[in-house]
Amino acid sequence: MSKTVSIIDYGMSNLLSICRAFEHIGAMVQVIDKAEDVLKSDYLILPGVGAFPDGMKELAKRGLVEHIQQFAGSGKPLLGICLGMQMLLSKGHEHTVTDGLNIIEGEVLALPKDMKGYKVPNINWHSADENAPGNWKGSVFENTKNGTCFYFVHSYYAHPADEKHLLATSQFGDLKFAAAVKRENVTGTQFHPEKSGEDGLELLRRFIRD
Amino acid sequence: MSPKRLIARLDIKGHRLVKGIHLEGWRFLPKHPNAYCYDYYLQGIDEIIYVDAVASLYGRDSLKEIIRKTTENVFIPITVGGGIRTIDDAHDILRSGADKVAICSQAVKTPELISEVANKFGNQCMVLSIQAKKNTSGRFEVWYDVAREKTEMDVMEWARKGEALGAGEILLTSVDMEGMEKGMDLELIRQVSQVVSIPVIASGGLSNAGDFVKAVGEGADAVAVAKAFHYGRVTVEQIKREAAEQGINVR
């Protein structure tokens, strides 16, 4: 039986676009919103568009927090996208301080508003750079050329406590921020691979290969 | 310098792609809108904007059908505008596969809609679409209802207010230059870019790659191109190559 990509629906995401992208690359896709379905998943996607506190509240409301944490510990591939990536971290500083899923230690901070020529929200294609040589081997970026551009839409950025969890970085003025994070089987992208053209699709293809 | 985006704008009437001058006198283009869109995607366009040119209550299903079909093979951000009057309209369009909504007329009539959409779906989702026209004394005024109705409102004031209400981007269309292929309204672009700190998408009048460079030089974060693409006067690649040669950061 072929493996299925499970996309968590907690009311805050561009589900349709993510489904379409996975369908396009030939994956079996299901949308799940029940806690018990999380652990049964082969590949889990935590999408998200919106504010950090709202996102965590909606996950908690559906009893999903612990199950996502358990899934992360299971060794099976988990991908967080945009807000879904940010919530993988320990704490968010959007509006107020909110606890995240704490799967990757670190914080989510506001993009600086005083970077000359760089505007917030950051709505743009940015190049993703390999944080350290060889870092992308075995990751979703394995088939990606260093410096490939992806589409970002965000006002906050993830700051992992340990640099080893930085998978790819981008520049926002003088600020180098996490374009992607990774800890073992858990990956998060600040950008939207489902909206980043053929390069984004390639990244998703690589994700479902594991 | 932050990267600059190149966007294809497709004005839609019913299920057809149209192009006019000064947002009127629409002419139909031969191919299906999805065919143009897919072509621009393969050429490396950064985003797509669909605008329902007649913003009618009828024909909404064909617009949604176009969006839905686009999401099947075009994997870049899609903004949809025209005829969005309520938060439910916005939700409906987003559910069809759009990533952002562009609101013009209803934002003029009930500015609180900007905040409602921004609060519910996020600022990044709420594009304030401004139709600007220069009056006889040289001041830019806000028009709406596909540039048929006029307000006394100053474009800069409206842009600032829109940002304060929660708009995440401004789609700035120069009605005077729209469809003319005589270059963009650089003065308009400069003035608006100076008063807001959110991204400004300049639209209307691009005729060649140099116009992209000029618009960016005046502060545009993105440029939307319609006629020049649809009629094959310039390609995505030509614009991006020229921009890169001029030291502009493009994908």
Image (tube, coloured by chain):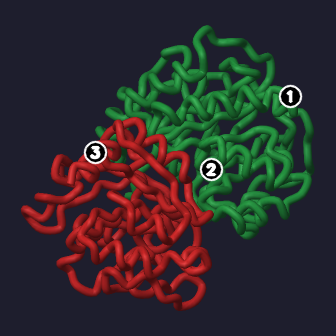
| Relative image position of residue B232 (x, y in whole percent) | 49, 15
Q: Write the residue at 80% across / 26% down.
A: B59
Calculate the distance from the C-alpha at mark 2 to the C-alpha at mark 3. Answer: 26 Å
Assign a secondary structure to mark 3: helix
| Relative image position of residue A72 (x, y in whole percent) | 32, 74
Calculate the distance from the C-alpha at mark 1 to the C-alpha at mark 2. Answer: 21 Å
Q: Which residue is mark 3?
A: A205
Q: Residue furthest front?
A: A1
Which color has been applied to chain A in this rendered view? red
Q: Write the residue at 36% across / 42% down.
A: A27
Q: Residue furthest top?
A: B30
Q: Which residue is mark 2?
A: B100
Residue B72 in view in this figure: yes
Question: Few, some or many C-alpha atoms within 10 Å of disc 2 (few <14, some 14-19, many ≥20)?
Answer: many
Question: Few, some or many C-alpha atoms within 10 Å of disc 3 (few <14, some 14-19, many ≥20)?
Answer: some
Q: Are marks 2 and 3 on the same chain?
A: no
